[in-house]
């Protein structure tokens, strides 16, 4: 893990909470309108999670994540506050562009999205979806940064104004639990661990 980093990755606040509670060790991503070259890629292998409330939809989330959607709607940042809470750091273990919809659906239960959301994301623009296995770390304290107009828009990657430190970050999942989940995902996707 890098000692400091200035890159952040926009994630729905509800999904971040589900990841932070250890419910999942992966997310699925297609990307926003303002991505470089018009499509999402896994540009970074380590990043802070930048919670966003934009585009969160109840119909896209599995039932066990819905309480987090309601809870995050009550956070100050959900109402356009000028501060962003940074609570977690992620290290990518695997990032695979899945081009087979059946394979994407085989990952059900290992990510926070409904089958309909998987279909919608998979079919947005060109067919396919990124499966990202992330090891999530909880920071020892919430880092609060000022919002900035440069952070706005439908983009996944946000270069922060200044680097933040990762010292004291602790894994959300025990090593054995994380490795078990990562192994299941690798088996489904046909990935051999390096």
Image: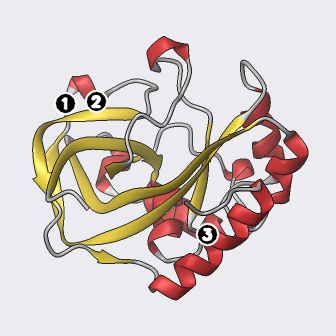
- Closer to the chain start, of discs 1 and 3, is 1
- Considering only vertical position in the picture, is 22 above or below 98? below
Q: Is residue 133 left or right of residue 128?
A: left
Disc 3 versus disc 2: nearer the observer: 3
- Kind of element beneath mark 3: helix
How far apart marks 1 and 2 lie (CA) works out to 5 Å
Disc 1 versus disc 3: nearer the observer: 3
Say the numbered circle drawn on residue 151. Answer: 2
- Kind of element beneath mark 1: loop
At horizontal 14% and vertical 59% (from top left) the residue drawn is 3
The residue indicated by pointer 3 is 182
User: Residue 170: x, y in percent?
Assistant: 29, 78
Q: Is residue 35 left or right of residue 106?
A: left
Say the numbered circle drawn on residue 137. Answer: none
The residue indicated by pointer 1 is 148
User: Residue 188: x, y in percent?
Assistant: 79, 61
């Amino acid at each position: 893990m890098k000692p400091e980093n200035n890159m952040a990755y926009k994630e729905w606040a509800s999904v971040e909470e589900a990841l932070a509670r250890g419910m999942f060790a992966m997310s699925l991503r297609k990307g926003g309108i303002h991505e470089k070259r018009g499509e999402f890629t896994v540009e970074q292998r380590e990043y802070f999670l930048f919670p966003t409330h934009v585009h969160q939809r109840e119909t896209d989330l599995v039932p066990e994540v819905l309480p987090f959607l309601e809870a995050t709607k009550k956070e100050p940042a959900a109402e356009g506050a000028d501060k962003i809470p940074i609570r977690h750091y992620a290290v990518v273990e695997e990032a695979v562009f899945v081009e087979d919809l059946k394979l994407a659906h085989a990952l059900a239960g290992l990510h926070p999205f409904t089958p309909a959301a998987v279909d919608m994301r998979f079919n947005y623009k060109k067919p396919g979806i990124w499966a990202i296995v992330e090891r999530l770390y909880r920071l020892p304290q919430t880092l609060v940064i000022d919002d900035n107009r440069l952070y706005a828009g439908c983009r996944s990657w946000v270069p922060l104004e200044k680097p933040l430190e990762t010292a004291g970050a602790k894994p959300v999942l025990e090593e054995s639990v994380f490795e078990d989940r990562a192994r299941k995902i690798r088996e489904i996707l046909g990935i051999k661990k390096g």
